[in-house]
Image (cartoon, rainbow, N blue to C red):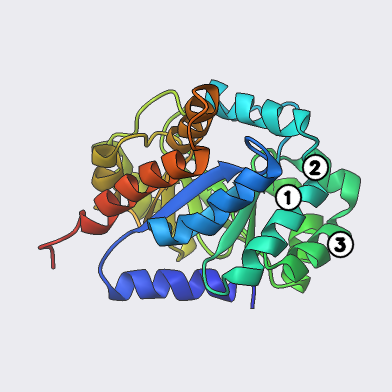
Amino acid sequence: MTKDRIDRRFAALKAENRAGFVAYVMAGDPDAATALEILKGLPAAGADLIELGFPFSDPMAEGPTIQRASQRALAGQMTLNGTLDLARAFRAGDADTPLILMGYLNPLLNKGFEVFAREAAAAGVDGLIVVDCPPEEADPLADALEANGVALIRLATPTTDDARLPVVVRRTSGFVYYVSVAGVTGVKSAEAGDVAPAVARVKAASGLPVAVGFGIRTPDQAAAVARVADAAVVGSALVDEIESAAKLNENVTEKVLSKASQLAKAVRSARLGTA
């Protein structure tokens, strides 16, 4: 099964002439039980794919919002194994929504690529994004993932030139994640005018759908990106809802799912009336 879910979902989105909404949350944020409630609620709120972060002490690509989420998760004793437990519990009730893990290389090295890939596939994980794994060093990880049917999803950025791009997308499957801004998550804003030619270039090089993230916080921004990309990824805006609701002693799950629903509606309606 595994990465076939990703391929089927993007095929369905293409048939519907709409982009996908990809929701990112951090495993264990604000706690494991609430994180699972949020995960289970995201598909009904409109998430077409879900990215589940596994916490790491030095999340170098993240802005303050997701850095704090990682710190909260680690303080609550969330681990890579705990993240796989969350994935397994989510998959027990949802056989269709693609689930992608996103994080950093050190926990995977510590666990072992083969063991991780086998356990991830068994938990129903469809893909993996590893922010700090250079493509030149990715073959052992790619071998383990491919043997277990899990997609290795790579990142392309505004600084990925034409010479570098074929190296970046080699052995990539599922989709390519285009980082729309030069910087960390949740700080700068994506501009659809800049994103459109980049998406076309990455699609031509990879032959894969392109999801755009790192600079999308509002429904309007999500809709603008959804008109030019195959999917729009939102993380920091959702994690902000988790943090603020927890601080105010509000219902965290309701708050984040309400925000996800607003973003999903914007993405789903972005291409209405287009051919």
Residue 240's tag is none
Asked if marks 2 and 1 touch (Cβ < 8 Å), the reply is yes
Residue 73 picture location, percent across and down: 70, 34
Q: Looking at this view, is 157 or 245 the one in front?
A: 245
Query: According to the image, label 3 marks what residue?
Result: 114
Q: How far apart are marks 2 and 1 (CA)?
A: 6 Å
Q: How crowded is mark 2: few (under 14 residues within 10 Å), some or many (20 or more)?
A: some
Pointer 3 with pointer 2, Cβ within 8 A: no
Relative horizontal placement of residue 26, taking residue 226 as reference (left or right): right
Task: Tell me the amino acid under the disc marked 2.
Answer: Thr
Q: Is residue 52 visible?
A: yes
Q: In this view, does 35 lie to the left or right of 8?
A: right
**Residue type at mark 1?**
Thr
Helix, strand or loop at label 3? It is helix
Q: Which residue is drawn at 44% across and 44% down?
A: 254
Q: Circle 1 sits on which residue?
A: 83
Q: Which mark is residue 79?
A: 2
The reply, left or right, for residue 136 in relation to residue 155 is: right
* Residue found 37% across the figure and 41% down from its top: 259
Query: Which type of secondary structure does the marked residue at label 1 adopt?
Result: helix
Q: Which of 137 and 9 is in front in this view?
A: 9
Q: Locate the N terminus and report the quarter of the image it occupies.
A: bottom right
Distance CA(mark 3)–CA(mark 1): 17 Å
Name the spot of residue 132 as percent of width and height, x first. 69, 38
Secondary structure under badge 2?
Answer: loop
Q: Which residue is located at x 40 percent, y 74 percent?
A: 11
